[in-house]
Image: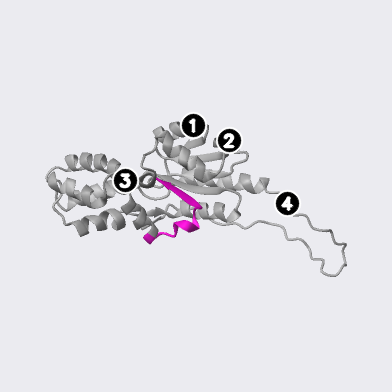
Amino acid sequence: MSELPRVRAVLIDLGGVVVRDPRPFVVGELARLGSPDPEALKRAYYGESLRLDAGRIDLREFYSRLRRAGLTSIDYPGFRSIVSDRSLAAFAPVLRELHRVKRRGTVRIVLASNVSRAVWKGLLRKFPLAAFSHDAVLSFRVGVLKPRRAFFLEALRKANARPGEVVFLDDSPSNVAAARRLGVRAYPVRSVKESVRILRKLGRDQSQRRPARSSPKRRSGERGATPRRTGARTGSGPSRRVVS
């Protein structure tokens, strides 16, 4: 990734980037608990999840459609637990890097995700997302999904920055392409390691651009004069640990 000048905001996807995409886990669990046609279940789940994420149906209606189609026989409380709790896991290394970028205070972090109300509420219960971001643009609130232009315009408004001052991370090539058409510096990420690498570089670049604080020089021997410390902290690289 080339140098990132004057980055004022980061838009970052949730599923597949900050947290595990919950859909494969949910489909796998429903199939394991009993489904006459796992492939039909997968197609129906992924198809109906688009309406769920756009806020056109709620979780109970989503469940009812699968149940009426004969694709699952579990009860609604069990279904809700799988979707909005058990399927949710965060990528700890990415959360750590987001926290470091936010703590520096030079870049605004906005979560930008196709996500349902039920999954979002589950994420808030399990993870302190306010510690890793300043705001969120969520499809169920906006009423449209990425890669629609309206979604990205709302994300840019929340970012409070011009497109060229924004970095966007997403695991979907179509979402990345849509953001680039608006002038956003968008990067496809395919792994936790890649997300961490970009966020670390972003943090280093912005730290180097922060103006140094000036202070009056003290002559050696003056009261209160102290030698300046040098050196940097060292530590191990990020793990690939998933927090659930």
Amino acid beneath label 2: Ser
**How much space separates mark 3 and mark 1, taking CA atoms?**
26 Å
Residue nearest the viewer, comparing 31 with 160: 160
Which residue is rendered at x = 53% and y = 40% of the image? 167
Earlier sequence position, callout 1 versus callout 2: 2
| Amino acid type at image mark 3 | Gly
| Upstream in sequence: badge 3 or badge 1 | 3
The answer for how far apart the CA atoms under marks 3 and 2 are is 37 Å
Q: Which residue is the site of mark 1? A: 180
Q: Alpha carbon of mark 1 to alpha carbon of mark 4: how far?
A: 33 Å
> Reading the chain from its start, which is encountered first: label 1 or label 4?
1
Say if residue 223 shows up in the picture: yes
Q: Choose between 157 and 226: the one closer to the eye.
A: 157
Q: CA distance from mark 1 to mark 2?
A: 15 Å
Residue that numbered label 3 is attached to: 55
* Three-letter amino acid code of the residue under disc 4: Ala
Q: Secondary structure at mark 3?
A: loop
Please give the name of the residue rendered at 56% of the width and 41% of the height, measured from the top-left corner: 161
Looking at the rendered image, the disc whose residue lies closer to the viewer, 3 or 4, is 3
Q: Say how the picture is coloured.
A: one colour
Instruction: Tell me the mark number nearer the camera, choosing from 1 and 4.
Output: 1
* Residue depicted at 41% across the width and 39% down the height: 171
Of circles 3 and 1, the one toward us is 3
Q: Which residues are magenta?
A: 125-138
The location of residue 191, given as percent across then percent down, is: 42, 43
